Image (tube, grey):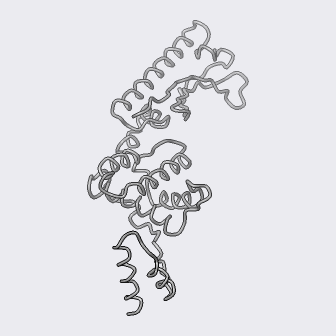
Amino acid sequence: MCERQTFSIDFIARKLKGEKDKAIIFARVTVDGETKEISTKDQVKFSAWDSRQEMVKGRTIEASAINNHINETRFKLQQKYRELEKHEAMITAQTVKDAYLGVQKKLKGHSLFELTDYFKKIWVDKIEFKNYATTIDYLKLFVKSQFKTEDIFLSQVNKQFATDLEYYIKTYPIKKHDKCDGNGLAKHIQRFKRILNWAADEIEWIDFNPCAKYKCPLKKSKRKKLSFQDVITMENKVFAFPNLAFAISAMHIYQNA
């Protein structure tokens, strides 16, 4: 990861509904502003909770046991964060929570922007990458808006993702006063599908392209023929490049064929 993330763990006590002085302690995990909470299942008197020190007041056996559990939970969460960092996995408050709770399935596989970064590395000098870069910019804006995070796993990409992406591009163009629809929109979806095809067929990061059957077809545009007067005007124009003048002459011959 290029930029250092902000990561913090806090402990809070939430009052139980209908109870005046009973509360459950929660661990609050925050990564880059995103917050998730995990119940420690420890129940305490709300009046005995020290919110500043994030621990139970007093030296009773019960208070000591709960405070020890809080310290253990903090240590394990920090440990899970470091493990994710070490393996260069996608780190969000949710993935730290999942790692702590043992939800391994969500931690497997590559992420969407790991894929686009690798695609850029391989293809940046081999194709007209400027257009792909714009498509990737749309993907990043869409993921941040839709998922409230900086990245998602490829396993989260499906046909519904493509449907929502198409709607997002159409509704929120990067250039505010230049609506992206028609063939411009279709080409963004087409490039996105090509990246997924590459992930499935060439580098095998996914088993198949989940959006392969999603359709956003290009519309054939009808080219308007030049009038005879248009061709004559162009033929009589003096061009700095002889090849261009020859092309205009050829156009005239074709027009009269």
Count the numbered circles shown: 0
The residue at 47%/85% (across/down) is: 232
The residue most toward the top is: 59
Looking at the rendered image, the quarter that the N terminus falls into is top left
* Camera-nearest residue between 56 and 93: 93
Looking at the rendered image, the quarter that the C terminus falls into is bottom left
Q: Quadrant of residue 131?
A: bottom left
Q: Position of residue 119 (x, y in %)?
A: 33, 50
Q: Position of residue 254 (x, y in %)?
A: 38, 88
Q: Position of residue 199 (x, y in %)?
A: 32, 54
Q: Position of residue 77 (x, y in %)?
A: 45, 26
* Camera-nearest residue between 186 and 60: 186
The residue at 57%/6% (across/down) is: 59
Q: Is residue 204 above or below residue 45?
A: below
Q: Is residue 233 above or below residue 4?
A: below
The residue at 31%/52% (across/down) is: 125
Q: Is residue 251 above or below residue 48?
A: below
* Camera-nearest residue between 257 and 215: 257
* Camera-nearest residue between 43 and 8: 8
Image position of 29 (left or right of 79):
right
